[in-house]
Amino acid sequence: MALEKLIRDAATHNDFVLHYQPVFEIVGRRLVGFEALLRLPTADGTLIPPATIIPIAEEIRLIDKIGAWVLREACRTAKSWPSDLTVAVNLSSSQFESGSVEPAVAEALNESGLDPHRLELEITEGLLLNHTHATLETLRRLKDKGVSIVMDDFGTGYSSLSYLWKFPFDKIKIDRSFMESFAQSGHNVETVVKTIIALGREMNMRVTVEGVETAEQVDFLYDANADQVQGYFFGKPVSAARVEAAMLDDR
Ligand code: G
Ligand code: G
Ligand code: MN
Ligand code: NA
């Protein structure tokens, strides 16, 4: 398959790129950091998205290698930002199964010199569903280092509520499908989002809402006490060069 060869070659030559989407604190509309998102540039100038790359990388067993590169690149890039900004990296459950996460995180932090408190690791339900004792131990050790653990895409899939007390999350990210439903289903989705935010706060977790596209949604989330917001209203994912240029403009 052509795509498979593209991914193999990219993994060999480190041809992937990361784009960065800004995350804002809702009170004061302050930039707090970025989420790193994987892409593969192609010869015709388009970008292959992570939804295409990751499943193939897992199947051909290159996810550990690519995942380690993502961690190194994200930490190296974040090190050049103002020191109050965080970087969030998405992890695949395969990286936990193979035991490659801890050494990859350690290497990325050592090599870059990034303060571990500036690194957030986003994990999804796939990991939690099939977790082992080793998974939990790994998450605890990462937290002990100062790294934050984030439950990504919260509210999708099933039985995710029980994960809230079984895993040591610092933050939950409410999936963008909730903001998508916002315009259509109005009050019902508002109630659910408010309740998730209250639940997260009650459990001492910060709550980020993804997929925020309108000023109306921002006002609602402010009233609902969300901590952080991410979405096209605040900024699309952009290259590291564009992040840097925007920062130089601002400061
Ligand atoms: O950028 P985009 O909206 O296409 O990203 C879709 C999803 O792909 C993200 O929400 C995230 O879950 C996943 N993703 C993005 N980058 C990475 C990565 O570096 N590693 C893994 N495992 N998943 C990623
Ligand atoms: O899987 P994860 O949610 O971590 O990835 C976020 C993805 O969602 C990014 O690939 C990004 O392109 C996309 N995204 C981010 N903000 C918005 C938004 O406001 N609206 C929509 N429709 N998609 C978004
Ligand atoms: Mn994510
Ligand atoms: Na997400």
Image (spheres, rainbow, N blue to C red):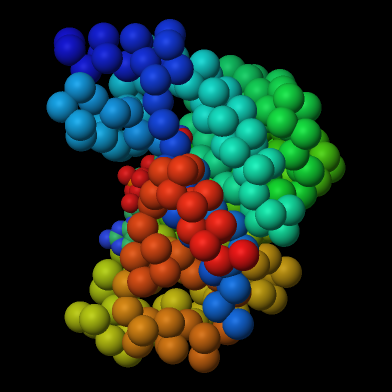
Q: Position of residue 50 (x, y in %)?
A: 34, 35
Between residues 129 and 80, which one lies in front from this camera angle?
80
Q: Would residue 22 appear left or right of 85 to someone viewing this image?
A: left
Q: Would residue 225 appear left or right of 103 to someone viewing this image?
A: left
- Observer able to see residue 208: no
Q: Quadrant of residue 78?
A: top right
Q: Position of residue 150 (x, y in %)?
A: 60, 52
- Residue depicted at 49% across the width and 52% down the height: 245
Q: Quadrant of the C terminus?
A: bottom right
Q: Position of residue 95 (x, y in %)?
A: 55, 25
Between residues 165 and 208, which one lies in front from this camera angle?
208
Q: Position of residue 135 (x, y in %)?
A: 66, 33
Q: Residue furthest right?
A: 144
Between residues 46 and 143, which one lies in front from this camera angle?
46
Above or below: residue 4 compared with residue 107: above
Q: Quadrant of ligand 1?
A: top left
- Residue depicted at 36% across the width and 84% down the height: 215
Q: Quadrant of residue 184?
A: bottom left
Above or below: residue 91 compared with residue 162: above
Q: Quadrant of residue 239?
A: top left
Q: Would residue 6 appear left or right of 150 to someone viewing this image?
A: left
- Observer able to see residue 182: yes
